[in-house]
Structure formats: C-alpha cells, structure tokens
Image (spheres, rainbow, N blue to C red):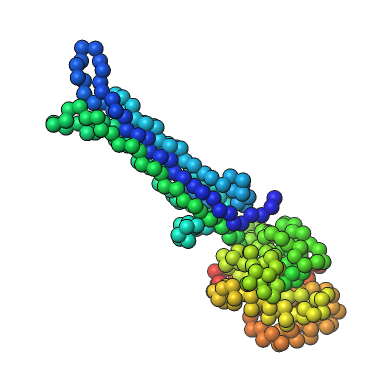
C-alpha cells in the first residue's frame, strides 16, 4: 500500500433540528395549548487514534466528512432525534491542524486517544418553550444551529524508538531488514526507499523496539531537493537517531566525511532540536574491507569528522555487529537515558 502521510479534508458537524410549531388537538379539549417539541442536536465530529490503520491513504478519496443532522421536533412535546456523532479513525501519530488558522488542534500519540474537532449544532426550540401567562398560544419557534465546519490538515508522523538517518544507499534499508522482520526494497541505486518503513526489532524475551527507515537525504534537502525532506518530520518523534555512513561508497565523490557533513547541515536547517537529538554513529559496510584494515579506516573517518558520541561498526548485509547494536539500543531505551 502506498504510504500517504499528509492530506487535506473538510469536516462538518451536523445541523440542529428545527423546533416544532404545534398545538394540542384532542376531542373535547378546546384550545389545548402549544405542544411543539424541540429539535434534536446535530452530531459532533471526533478523531480516534487506532492501530487498525497506518496510513492516511483513504482520505485521498473521501475528502468531505459530515456528521448526521438532528431531526425536527414534533407535536406532543416530542423532541427530535439527535444526530449521530461521526468518529473518524486515523493512525496513531496523526496531528490535526486547521488549514485556515494554522492552529494545531490535536496530536494523537496513543492508541485510543480521542478528540472533538467540530461541535454539532443545538436543536431549535419548539413553541411550547415560549408559552407564558401573557402568551398562551405562542407561534414562535427557533431554527436549529448550524454545526461547526472546518478545513483540516492531517499529518502522520511515525512513532518509533529508533530512526535511521543517512544518505541514499548508506545501508538503512539493509539494516532494518537485518535487524527486524520488515522487508523494505534494497538495491544499488539512490532513493530505493520511497516511503517510510517500520520494523520491530526483537532483542530477547519480551524485549523489542520499533525502528523507522526513511528515504535518504541529499544536499539541499531542507530546500526541497530529493525525497527525504518530506519525511524528516518522522524523525522528530524517535528517541535515538542512528546516523549511518557508508565507509566504502561506490561513488568516490561522496566520501564518508562529506556525507556526514551534508547530513549535519540538513538537520540543522530543518530543525535545531532535531539536530540536537541523541545520535549514534553507525559505520556500515565493514565487510567490504579486510578485517585488518577496518579499524584504521574507521578511525580515520571518526577523526576527520570529529565525532565524540557512541560508535558502532557493522555490516548490515552480513549482520556483523548488528546484535551488539540491537542490545545496546535496547538497554538505552529501557533505562530511559534518552536526552
């Protein structure tokens, strides 16, 4: 299924039913008086976060969502039926914003979170409501109120413990395939990953975490180049970023040091908070070098970029170093030592 993470829709709550103009008409009862009932309230619109869906693709087809109107009141002081509320199911991680005011209305981060986005209109008053000592036969009613309507922007941000960050072909998809049951496309050309992938990494009995693979970034991503800028927002909710570097790139013009600096620059342009998030350096594709040369080659890269944080040397293809990385991530997440 195509991943859709941003869509605009229109929602409308139900209109309240009109009040009823009615008088009692029973045998042997003259001038029975007013008995018009109130109109029913219109239904409201809610959003509910659920794990039964993980995409906003359905909203590309259904653009308008309307709650049920309230029914008109009737004689014998009978209130009209209230309109049913409309509950719209969205994936966990969906933010809801008003397109016109740019205000963020809600951020549904947990399963079962529910938020009202449009209030149904109140039902109108029947003529019984206007009976008084000086007006025994009122012919006045009120109409039901219109329900609220809004133009909304829905935006899905993946919720994962670990996010994979790096240039195209750095090995992000290979790593998530190696460490989880997710099977993203892997190939030797840029932008193999066109949509985010989530994988659950099992480390031990009842121990697991969620890893997110997003499209690779390139220089100029913060200005709209490439694909990654569309998905950088997903990394904002991860606890740890794994910055993956290809230590032996096939494109000699993209040396590891330049690749690192380009990503650093794009992170800072996109969000200073994102650039300061906990990040580990992952030096990938050590299988392409003789084992005796790996340490010297990696140390040279580390020294050139001036990295001071945690470092792991792995081969996503062969799996070398992946178990150690998974265990370290699990320990960090369980201890809640995330900056």
Compared to 329, does 78 lie above or below? above
Q: Is residue 77 among what the camera can see?
A: no
Counting every numbered tag in the picture gives: 0
Percent position of residue 110, x then y: 52, 55
Q: Give residue 275's position: percent from left, percent from top.
A: 59, 76
Which residue ends up furthest to the left in the rendered image?
134
Rendered location of residue 182, percent (x, y): 72, 57
Q: 201 left or right of 88?
A: right
Q: Give how far across and how far down residue 155 sits, in percent.
A: 56, 57
Q: Residue at x 58, y 60 (%)?
A: 157
Residue at point 25%, 21% (across, down): 24
| Residue 329 in the figure: left or right of residue 250 | left
Residue drawn at point x = 59 percent, y = 76 percent:
269
Q: Quadrant of the C terminus?
A: bottom right
Q: Is residue 132 left or right of residue 322?
A: left
The part of the image, by quadrant, that contains residue 300 is bottom right
33 or 47, nearer to the observer: 33
Choose top left, top right, bottom left or bottom right for residue 219.
bottom right
Above or below residue 304? Residue 175 is above
Q: Quadrant of residue 284?
A: bottom right
Q: Which residue in the rendered view is the most extreme toward the top? A: 28
Q: Is residue 33 above or below residue 242?
A: above
Name the outermost residue toward the front: 139
Q: Is residue 291 left or right of residue 181?
A: right
Is 330 situated above or below 73?
Answer: below
| Identity of the residue drawn at 66% across and 54% down | 3
**Residue 236 makes an appearance in the image:** yes
């Amino acid at each position: 299924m195509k991943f859709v993470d941003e869509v605009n829709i229109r929602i409308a709550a139900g209109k309240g039913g009109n009040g009823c103009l009615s008088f009692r008409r029973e045998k042997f009862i003259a001038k029975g008086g007013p008995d018009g009932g109130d109109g029913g309230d219109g239904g409201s619109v809610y959003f509910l976060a659920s794990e039964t869906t993980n995409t906003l693709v359905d909203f590309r087809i259904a653009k308008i969502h309307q709650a049920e109107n309230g029914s008109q009141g009737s004689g014998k002081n009978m209130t009209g039926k209230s309109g049913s509320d409309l509950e719209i199911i969205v994936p966990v991680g969906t933010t809801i914003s008003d397109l016109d005011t740019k205000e963020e209305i809600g951020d549904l981060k947990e399963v079962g979170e529910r938020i009202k986005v449009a209030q149904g209109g109140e039902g109108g008053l029947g003529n019984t409501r206007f009976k008084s000592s000086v007006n025994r036969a009122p012919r006045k009613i009120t109409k039901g109120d219109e329900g609220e309507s809004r133009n909304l922007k829905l935006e899905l941000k993946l919720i994962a413990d670990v996010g994979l960050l790096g240039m195209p072909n750095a090995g992000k998809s290979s790593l998530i395939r190696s460490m989880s049951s997710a099977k993203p496309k892997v190939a030797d050309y840029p932008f193999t990953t066109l949509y985010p992938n989530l994988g659950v990494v099992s480390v031990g009995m009842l121990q697991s975490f969620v890893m997110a693979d997003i499209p690779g970034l390139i220089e100029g991503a913060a200005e709209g180049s490439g694909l990654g800028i569309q998905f950088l927002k997903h990394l904002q909710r991860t606890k740890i970023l794994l910055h993956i570097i290809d230590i032996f790139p096939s494109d000699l013009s993209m040396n590891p040091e330049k690749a690192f600096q380009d990503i650093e620059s794009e992170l800072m342009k996109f969000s200073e908070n994102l650039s300061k998030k906990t990040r580990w350096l992952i030096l990938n594709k050590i299988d392409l070098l003789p084992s005796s040369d790996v340490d010297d080659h990696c140390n040279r890269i580390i020294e050139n970029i001036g990295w001071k944080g945690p470092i792991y040397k792995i081969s996503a293809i062969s799996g070398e170093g992946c178990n150690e990385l998974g265990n370290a991530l699990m320990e960090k997440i369980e201890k809640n030592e995330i900056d």
